[in-house]
Each structure stands twice: as structure tokens, then as C-alpha cells.
Image: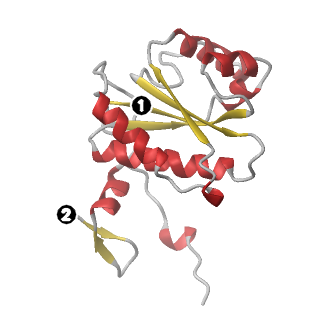
Amino acid sequence: MEAIKLNNSIQISNQVLSTIKQRSSARAYSTEQLTQSELDTILKAGLMAPTGMNRQEIHFTVVKGNNPVLAELDEENRRLRGQEKQPHNFYYEAPVLIFLSAEDDFKWNKVDSGIAVENMTLAAESLGLGTLIIGCVYDALHGEKQEYFSEKLRIPESYSFQIALAVGHKTDNRIPHEYDYEKQVTILE
């Protein structure tokens, strides 16, 4: 197990912290599909995430990377952003996407969705899989075609998209981002 240096003087050896440290956003995936066991593990990690008042208001929609709705969503996303066709789509050809939606009228739905998606990324990383947390399609899924995409993605009534996760066997080896502990952390005594 790797020792993690948290600041200039503290080191911790811990499997969870090691997984956090090594995780980075994958932007290249093989065509290999996830096993049902891998997918179930990732989904259960999301389901186990805490939610405000234990509301459990998050819904998970799994979409295979070749589903036609993703091409439509990619096109709408590019149209709204004024972008030309890129050599990759918004999910970098990952074989699976998981869309998290939540009850519209629950104050903590965005926070709860963020917690769930992070649980899922760490579970995927621990399985040797790559992930990309996706928020860039938010406007496309909340815009003039919201009802259409909500129906296609089977988002429950009175729920709306919050965040998505691309998952697959990564083929890139991106280095996790650096951080500046001294600049980014304030400790009040």
C-alpha cells in the first residue's frame, strides 16, 4: 500500500486514499464492454452514497455507448455550444454512460448527485476502470429538448439530469492533477 503525503508532515497509508490519488479523468477507452459484475459494483457504490435526510432521490440510467440517443445528445450539445464536430464525442467513446437524475424539488439533489458520482468513480478506479465525470451536457438536457431527452433516457417524471459518468477500460494514462495544499487550504484555529 502506498503512503500518501497530505501536506509537508503527514503521511497516510490507506487503500481508499491511494485510489483517490491515482484516479484521473480518462479520455480514451477500448471497445471492451464492462462485465455485469463491474457495472453492478459501480451502481451499488452510487446507491450507497449518503443523501440529504436519507431521501435517496437519485435515479441512475445506464446507456451503452453505441445507443443512438447519445449521438443526438452530442449533436445538441455541440449546437448549443457553437462547436464544430470533434474527433471524439462528449464521452470519448466510453462503452457505458451512467446518467444521474434527481427529484427537481429536493434542495440537496445536486450535492447528493455529486457525492454519488464520486463514489462511483472511486469504485471504478478500484476495479482498474477509467471514468470521466460529465457535466457539459447539462444545458442540452435542460434546454428546449429536455422533455425529448428525458423520455429517451427514461428519466422519471419530476426528475431532471444532474451529472453523468462515462466508464470503461481506459487506454490513456493521464496523470492525476496537481494541487497546491498551502494555497487551497485554510485552517482556522
Judging by the rendered image, the residue that carries numbered circle 2 is 1
In the image, residue 105 above or below residue 14: above
74 and 5: which is toward the camera: 74
- Residue 8 x, y percent position in the rendering: 38, 78
- Pick whichever of labels 1 and 2 is earlier in the sequence: 2
From where the camera sits, is residue 182 visible?
yes
Q: Residues within 10 Å of mark 2 (few under 14, many from 20)?
A: few
96 and 176: which is toward the camera: 96
25 on left or right of 135: left
Name, please, the residue furthest toward the bottom: 189
Q: Circle 2 — which element? A: loop
Identity of the residue drawn at 30% across and 73% down: 12
- Residue 143 x, y percent position in the rendering: 77, 24
Q: Residues within 10 Å of mark 1 (few under 14, many from 20)?
A: many
Determine the CA span between mark 1 and mark 2. 27 Å
- Residue 153 x, y percent position in the rendering: 60, 21
137 on left or right of 173: right
Colouring convention used in this rendered image of the protein: secondary structure
Q: Circle 1 — which element? A: loop
> Could you tell me the amino acid type at mark 2?
Met
Mark toward the viewer: 1 or 2:
2
- Residue 69 x, y percent position in the rendering: 57, 13
Identity of the residue drawn at 43% across and 44% down: 120
Q: Quadrant of residue 159?
A: top right
Q: Quadrant of residue 74?
A: top right
Q: If the image is split into quadrants, where does the C terminus sit?
A: bottom right
Q: Quadrant of residue 33?
A: top left
Identity of the residue drawn at 65% across and 60% down: 53
Q: If the image is split into quadrants, where does the N terminus sit?
A: bottom left
> Could you tell me the amino acid type at mark 1?
Arg
Judging by the rendered image, the residue that carries numbered circle 1 is 27
Name, please, the residue furthest toward the top: 68
